[in-house]
Amino acid sequence: MMKRKFLAGIAAFAMAAATFTAVDAKSLDEILSDGKLRIGINPNFPNMSTRNDAGEWVGFDIDVGNALAAAIGVEVEWVPTETPQRVPFLVSDRIDISLGALTRNTERAKLIDYTVPLHTEVLAVLTTDSVEGSSWQDFNKEGVTLANMRGNWTVDWIGENMPNVEVELVDTLADTVRLVGQGRADAIVENIDFFMAFTENYPDVQWRVVENPIFVAYCAIGVSQGNENLTEVLNIALYNLHSSGMINETWEKHYGAPMLRTVDPDPYF
């Protein structure tokens, strides 16, 4: 049932994206001639990208975007790109590349190209040492309360796959972690990487991530379809950034913990 709903949602997204007129993307030569790389970033996605008190863009995507532009030898033009705009902005040539945790899937791949993976998203269980359970299925029982955020797709996933739990909904990542840190909920089932930084607010709590994840998704950089030269250059740059440790170090800098599943650099991309 959940799979059918997910596929239906993806199909609707593909139809919506197809309504944007496809235009020729800027080639690498044109980007070099312009001296700038238009990078789509999510304007409301800490710690991926957000503005600080001085109005400057900061976050994981910002550091990575700057490193990629430096590798190519151009400046960056940041283009705020909300989550549903990522593919349409590429198709309509409003951006050259898209960041913003763009998960690879087959429907998007019909419309855009991907680089090699940039980072992962791990759907897993974040809990504490005081709560027993060695797999996510162990938490699917009466008496367990899960914390989550209103509007997250995982709320529906929990409803269909963990029907025996209670779910307490809040509005922010920090509030979600607070429920568990204060003992008002037992665990969080979500893309846990994005929640880890907030556990530092509760240093007396013994946090743990259940070892076996539910699944691992790979997020890459979106590129306009057929823009092969730009994609190749980005892949080489990403290989170097992964090999040097820059990607993982930058992730830990912004999220307060290592990436739960790292991307192993592979020269044979």
Image (tube, rainbow, N blue to C red):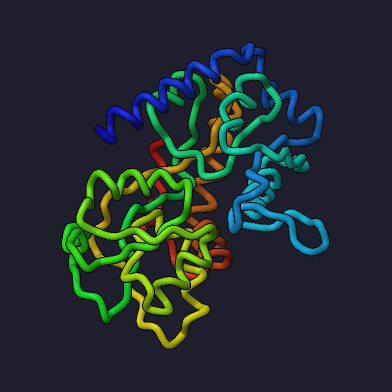
Q: In which quarter of the view is residue 138 placed?
A: bottom left
Q: Quadrant location of the C terminus?
A: top left
Query: Which residue does the image show at 53% across and 57% down from the upper left?
Result: 171
Would residue 60 be visible to someone looking at this image? Answer: no
Query: Which residue does the image show at 64% across and 57% down from the upper left?
Result: 59
- Up the image or down, 85 lies above or below 55; here it is above
Q: Quadrant location of the N terminus?
A: top left
Q: Nearer the viewer, residue 211 or 45?
A: 45
Q: In which quarter of the view is residue 136 placed?
A: bottom left
- Up the image or down, 82 lies above or below 67; here it is above
Provide residue 34's location: percent of width, then percent of height.
81, 29
- Up the image or down, 249 lies above or below 224; here it is below
Q: Nearer the viewer, residue 53 or 62?
A: 53
Marks counted in the figure total 0
Q: Nearer the viewer, residue 199 or 177?
A: 177
Query: Which residue does the image show at 25% across and 44% down from the upper left?
Result: 160
Q: In the rendered view, does 258 fall on the left or right side of 21?
A: left
Query: Which residue does the image show at 46% across and 65% down from the upper left?
Result: 176
